[in-house]
Image (spheres, grey):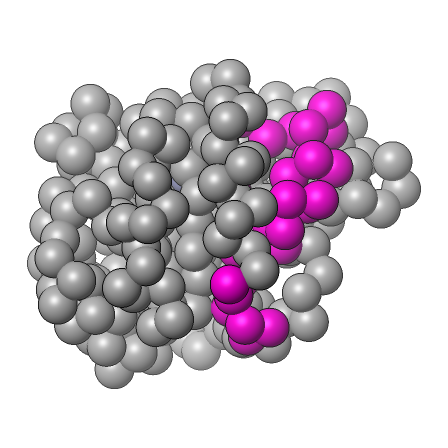
């Protein structure tokens, strides 16, 4: 069993709403994950986005808690923003908390309101913040019963399962309808297909946490790309 993780500052609860760039390690070089993730943090990423796929909720398999624990060991100061694209997130909250996750997001499509709220409580008991994710085709009304209770709402801007897909523009309207309903202590994250070309639109729609995978890891000037996604120095 992995040793208890070190405590990392929670970048979501301490945020003042300034844009946060969450680098998705799905696009990192997995053969040298620790070094690549460390480099992206040094070059200006604020936090690391860790995509967990079970081959059931999405048609792909990515990594599990042991890879997350190794990442935490390699980058002990990085806040880990874990995105559970799995059918049964409840079973994985504790393993990821032990593996160093500071936050877990799971999908509204996989559970009842009651189960979602119970998982939110479980995240808090485990010392993590909790996010509720919503797929591109799922209407904003699906999260009405739970929106007030989560630390973050994640709007998917691609169909979950793979990095490097094209941004789905129509999710911006949904995001604009969600943004005014959130309190200052709630974050709004967008995930999928984000890069320098559309980051401004994403921020203008109200998002303050921008996930970027292929755009930052695939860039020849990673520092400049991260700054452009955040909205400084572009
Ligand atoms: C998609 C994942 C995303 C993905 C983003 O299922 O949830 O986090 O890694 O990658 P890009 O930025 O390449 O679309
Ligand atoms: Zn993700």
> Split into 4 quadrants, where in the image is the N terminus?
bottom left
193 relative position to 222: left or right: left
Measuring 29% from the left and 65% from the top, which residue is drawn there? 146
On the image, the x and y values in percent for residue 196 come to 73, 29
On screen, residue 154 above or below 77: above
Q: Residue 54, located in which quarter of the rendered image?
A: top left
Q: How many marks are shown on the rendered structure? A: 0
Q: Is residue 17 magenta?
A: no
Q: Is residue 202 magenta?
A: yes
Measuring 51% from the left and 63% from the top, which residue is drawn there? 181
On the image, the x and y values in percent for residue 55 come to 15, 29
What is the magenta range? 181-208
212 or 2: nearer the viewer: 212
223 or 183: nearer the viewer: 183
Measuring 42% from the left and 27% from the top, which residue is drawn there? 158
148 relative position to 193: left or right: left
Q: Residue 225, located in which quarter of the rendered image?
A: top right
On the image, the x and y values in percent for residue 45 come to 65, 48
226 relative position to 52: left or right: right
């Amino acid at each position: 069993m992995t040793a208890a993780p070190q405590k990392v500052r929670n970048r979501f609860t301490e945020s003042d709403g300034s844009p946060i760039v969450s680098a998705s390690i799905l696009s990192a070089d997995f053969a040298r994950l620790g070094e690549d993730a460390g480099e992206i943090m040094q070059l200006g990423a604020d936090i690391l986005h860790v995509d967990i796929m079970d081959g059931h909720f999405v048609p792909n398999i990515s990594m599990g808690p042991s890879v997350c624990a190794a990442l935490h060991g390699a980058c002990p100061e990085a806040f880990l923003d874990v995105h559970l694209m799995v059918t049964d997130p409840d079973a994985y909250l504790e393993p990821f908390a032990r593996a160093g996750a500071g936050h877990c997001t799971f999908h509204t499509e996989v559970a009842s309101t009651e189960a979602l709220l119970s998982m939110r409580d479980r995240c808090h008991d485990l010392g993590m913040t909790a996010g509720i994710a919503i797929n591109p085709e799922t209407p904003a009304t699906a999260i009405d019963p739970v929106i007030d209770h989560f630390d973050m709402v994640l709007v998917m801007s691609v169909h979950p399962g793979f990095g490097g897909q094209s941004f789905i523009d129509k999710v911006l309207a949904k995001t604009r309808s969600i943004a005014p309903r959130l309190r200052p202590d709630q974050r709004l994250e967008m995930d999928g297909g984000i890069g320098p070309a559309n980051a401004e639109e994403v921020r203008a729609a109200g998002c303050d946490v921008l996930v970027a995978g292929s755009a930052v890891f695939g860039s020849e000037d990673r520092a400049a790309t991260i700054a452009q996604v955040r909205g400084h120095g572009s």
